Image (cartoon, grey):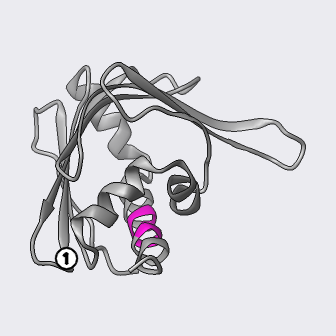
Amino acid sequence: MEQKTNLIAKDGKQEILITRTFDLPVNLLFKAYTEPELVEQWMGNKVLKLENQAHGSYQFETTDGQGNVLFRANGSIHKVIENKNITRTFEMENSGFPVQLEFLDFEPITEDTSKLTMKIVFKSVADRDNMLKLPFVQGINMAHNQLEKVISKLK
């Protein structure tokens, strides 16, 4: 699978920088992150809550066929500027990873293409390095591929 999502993790730093150029206008890329029904389609998680506003919050989960929770994540939304950026926290419940801070910047490149830049700040270098031991890079690339596939149908 082609790795279209780029990740930079410099040694000794508590952050990861993720970039991806999409064949989507910036308004559709932004909607992919802010409209619950679209988030569910490309992330594959149920959106329990998504309040895209300052002091808002969100919660996502995945369950198995018997209703057992396999994955749950939540966070606080600190700032939203339409088609520009989202500042939020992210926490995977019951994972052992502390809360991380995320800065998502949406940038138009042309009328039909846009760029997403995500800066994720971890509590420590060790936490960041432990995240990178997981199939994090492959997972975010697969999610971004699915996002582009689902949202392209809205063009």
Viewer-closest of 16 and 80 = 80
20 sits left or right of 134 in the view: left
14 sits left or right of 53 in the view: left
Q: At label 1, which amino acid type do we have? A: Thr
Above or below, comparing residue 39 to residue 15 in the picture: below
Residue of label 1:
113
**Is residue 146 one of those drawn in magenta?**
yes
Q: Position of residue 44 (x, y in %)?
A: 60, 56
Q: Position of residue 2 (x, y in %)?
A: 34, 80
Image quadrant occupied by the C terminus: bottom left
Element marked by disc 1: loop
Quarter of the image where one finds residue 108:
bottom left
Above or below, comparing residue 80 to residue 18 in the picture: above
Q: Main secondary structure of the magenta part?
A: helix
Q: Position of residue 147 (x, y in %)?
A: 43, 67
147 sits left or right of 77 in the view: right
Image quadrant occupied by the N terminus: bottom left
Q: Position of residue 119 (x, y in %)?
A: 18, 42
Above or below, comparing residue 92 to residue 26 in the picture: above
Span shown in magenta: 142-147
Viewer-closest of 113 and 67 = 113
Q: Residue at x 28, y 36 (%)?
A: 129
Q: Residue at x 52, y 56 (%)?
A: 43
- Specify few, some or many for label 1: CA neighbours under 10 Å numbering under 14, 14-19, or 20 or more: some
